Image (tube, rainbow, N blue to C red):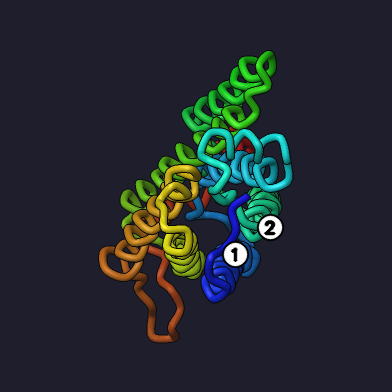
Amino acid sequence: MASWNSVPMEVAYEIVGWLAFFSWSFSFYPQVILNFRRKSVVGLNFDYLVFNLTKHSSYLIYNATLFFSPVIQRQYHEKYGFDEMIPVAANDVAFSIHAVLLTAVTLFQVVIFERGNQKVSKTCIAISAAAWIFAAVCFVLAWPKHSWLWLVSSFNTIQVVMTAIKYIPQVVMNFKRKSTIGWSIGNIILDLVGGVLNFGQLGIQSIDQGTWVNFYGNIGKTLLSLEVVFFDLVFIFQHYVFYPAKKDETGQTIISERIAPLLKPQNKSQEDDV
């Protein structure tokens, strides 16, 4: 089995990994707190939340099985070499569990707080359903030959795809409203820090082992970090450069006319949709 060549590198790997865990974990709270203070989720895109739950659930399945299952670990070593380290750390598993729970809490806030005429789109429902149907098909195909590494890798594929598309509805929504009111920038800044640290953790392992196998051996973690950094930078530009919030003389944020249509349901049927 592979082991660390340098104790300082191993320590740095653990420190950076847990810093990424805390940064990404805390990134959920600014949005939850903002929703609670406003007693409203107006401005937070519901498609983003549904995609996020699918993404983190898939990522949890991948991380937990690869980290805890000796069978899947053996299959990983058979594919990439027995001198390679498992690219999933304890902080990856802990983050995934926390992410699923906090995303569920945010979805619950959608149910109990003011949501205006916002609802989950049919496109989002169709894509999310397709993702789980894909996972079910992969399970059926993997069962006869016990191709468990291939199966859990399919969940990794799902989370990469969900990460690539989950931010798009919020980006588009901010663009149409010309505002980021209701969307927490604290969430984005912490998310960005976590993405950079997560990528750095892979780099530390690669330097110590003298190989780049862990980057493509856990391509999901690699692409996840790159996707997160890209979209977070887009949100930062939207918030601070393109659509900075206007405040009155008392320091209160001014709700623009572009946001007003979201505040009241257009009819009863829309009010009942989540």
Q: Are marks 1 and 2 in contact (CB under 8 Å)?
A: yes
Q: Horizontal and vertical percent for residue 117? A: 52, 43
Res. 183 in view:
no
Looking at the image, which residue is at 63% across and 19% down? 142
Determine whether 74 is above or below 183 in the image: above
Q: Which three-letter amino acid code belongs to the residue tagged 2? A: Ala
Residue carrying label 1:
21
Q: Which three-letter amino acid code belongs to the residue tagged 1? A: Phe
Res. 67 in view:
yes
Determine whether 249 is above or below 138 in the image: below
5 sits to left or right of 146:
left
Residue carrying label 2:
94
Q: Distance between the residues labelled 1 and 2?
A: 8 Å
Residue sitting nearer the eye, 185 or 121: 185
Q: Which residue lies furthest to the left in this view?
A: 242
The crowding category of the residue bearing disc 1, from other C-alpha atoms within 10 Å (few below 14, some 14 to 19, many at least 20), is many
For marks 1 and 2 on the same chain, the one whose residue lies earlier in the sequence: 1
Q: Horizontal and vertical percent for residue 170? A: 42, 49
88 sits to left or right of 185:
right
Looking at the image, which residue is at 62% across and 62% down? 32
Q: Horizontal and vertical percent for residue 227? A: 39, 50
Looking at the image, which residue is at 60% across and 68% down? 14
Q: What element carries label 2?
A: helix
Q: Is mark 1 on a helix, strand or loop?
A: helix
In which quadrant of the rendered image does the C terminus lie?
top right
| Numbered badge on residue 177 | none
Looking at the image, which residue is at 37% across and 54% down? 231
